[in-house]
Amino acid sequence: MENDTPIEEAVDIGAFARAWESIIAYLTDEAVWISFGLTAIKIILIIVIAGIVVRVVKKVIVNVFKVRARGPVQVSARRENTLLKLLQNVVSYVVYFIAVLAVLSAFEIDVRGLIAGAGIIGLAVGFGAQNLVRDIITGFFIIFEDQFSVGDYVRIGQAEGHVEEIGLRTTKIKSWTGELHIFPNGIITEVTNYSIHNSVAVVDISIAYEEDVEKAEQALREFCDSLEGKYEEILMKPELLGIQTLGASDVVMRIIAETQPMKHWYIARELRREIKQHLDTLGIEIPFPRMVMYSREEAVGEQDGQK
């Protein structure tokens, strides 16, 4: 046994030496480095060409939409922005997918066999990717039915803001305070869209009980007449509906004005400012909370005095 050990060690050393020599020969082979360099150049060219193609095609899509906007068949700007972003996303997905296949081909990987295998694997994965399929189908119907578009102001669940992007799988909503909400399309079951129809600005004005209600109503009607044509956001002359409620210390009157979509908040603020100035000019008081102090001791004293 002791005589076999040096022989085995010699065999191991010889095998290691031959393996090392083959590695050195492979690394110093000029043909190997040429092949490696050509493959690296191919990959770099594929990536660069893919990036250029994506940019060029996106630019072409933008120009096509600009030309189409001047055509006889008009589409709303909301829908154009949505379709523009969607087409740009699809172009990116398709071009980069082809680029990945080209990179695999550069490594001499059989892409056709990979695609054939992907079909079988995709069938198996499809059973576990139902949510993904649902997101894509729901996104398609959102765009097809024009439920909402890029730039619309919507409320989805607890999130409210402008639509930043509608993709094949997700929708992005940016609130006015800057938060970006991302929703998978499949979970969007209820949407409130504020940007499709005209809005209505609602302004409540409080008048003191001591004021002449008829005088106040006449003043507010004159104020509404004076606003005709003053704001381009107001589509119809503001209208005084009358007394809305009788409060604890005030009479509340309501004015409404139909405005362009999403302009009702701005118009309501402007109306409140101008109504305040108009009522101050006429000397009509806008009430403030009042508190009456009642002293039980004084009341008892008054009762004793009456007796």
Image: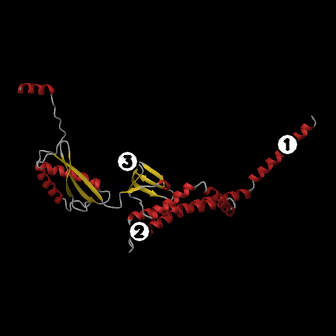
Which of these two is toward me, 155 or 243? 243
- Kind of residue at badge 1: Asp
Q: Is residue 294 above or below residue 257?
A: above
The numbered disc on residue 12 is 1
- Closest to the observer, 298 or 197: 298
Q: Quadrant of residue 33?
A: bottom right
The colour mode here is secondary structure
Q: Residues within 10 Å of mark 2 (few under 14, many from 20)?
A: few
Name the residue carrying label 3: 177
Q: Is residue 90 left or right of residue 276?
A: right
* Residue at 47% over, 67% down: 61
Kind of element beneath mark 1: helix
The x and y percentages for residue 184 are: 49, 53
Label 3 – label 2 distance at C-alpha: 31 Å
Residue beneath disc 2? 66
N-terminal of the two: label 1 or label 2? 1
Outermost residue toward the bottom? 72
Give left or right: position of 185 versus 272. Answer: right
